[in-house]
Amino acid sequence: MHKLILFASGTGTNAAAIMDWCKATGNASVALVVCNKEGAGVLDIAAKNNIPTLLINRESFRSADFVETLKGYGPSLLVLAGFLWKVPEAVVQAFPGKIINIHPALLPAYGGKGMYGHHVHEAVIAAGERSSGITIHYVNEHYDEGDIIVQAHCPVLPGDTPGALAKRIHKLEHYFFPHTIGYLLANV
Ligand code: GAR
């Protein structure tokens, strides 16, 4: 069975959607959740699903041991689901074409360092955009610049708050992220 390693440091709703999809389809299992934030909601979600977690700091993230630990799980894909640190070159090179990220906007717009979560939605609304969406893309050495796999759009409605837009974006993410993972596992 395909194994996934999730990298997540937020509330973990995308991680939960991926875990649910794994259970429902039996196509993959989540072998490990890597997290850089103590107390992050995703750690509780992993615990409830009996999935091991690895809490990292900047130093351990960049160590050669870390790459070896990841390799030890034999993952088919490394999935960034609300993970904000730039992935070290050594990790990118160890898993060519096997690391994907989800971004809550239509890249290349509203991407790059500092553009995450509510910051993205605030910027989209402030710019008067009429639509936004999600981007699922391969990870390379630069923030949000790897080749795009899938984008899905949604409207930005008059009077939208960042919170309202975030909800609409999360719905897209929870559907398209697991399904894109399924596509990649079956076809790549
Ligand atoms: C998601 O909306 C994801 O697109 C975003 O963080 C959120 C995590 O939510 N990622 C980025 O902004 C990356 N630049 P979650 O913890 O509920 O899955």
Image: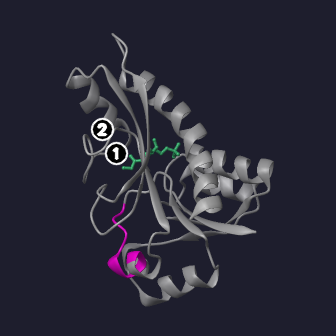
Q: Which image quadrant shows ligand 1?
A: top left
Q: Residue at x 60, y 38 (%)?
A: 175
- Which is more toward the observer, 14 or 118? 14
> Residue 177 placed where, x, y %?
55, 46
Indicate the secondary structure of the residue bearing disc 1. loop
Task: Give the labeled residue for mark 2.
Answer: 119
Q: Residue at x 67, y 69 (%)?
A: 3
Q: Residue at x 24, y 40 (%)?
A: 109
Q: Is residue 41 magenta?
A: no
> Residue 37 placed where, x, y %?
47, 60
> Residue 70 placed where, x, y %?
56, 79
Badge 1 vs badge 2, beta-carbon distance below 8 Å: yes
Indicate the secondary structure of the residue bearing disc 2. helix
Magenta stretch? 85-92
Task: Give the labeled residue for mark 1.
Answer: 116
Q: Amino acid at mark 1?
A: Tyr
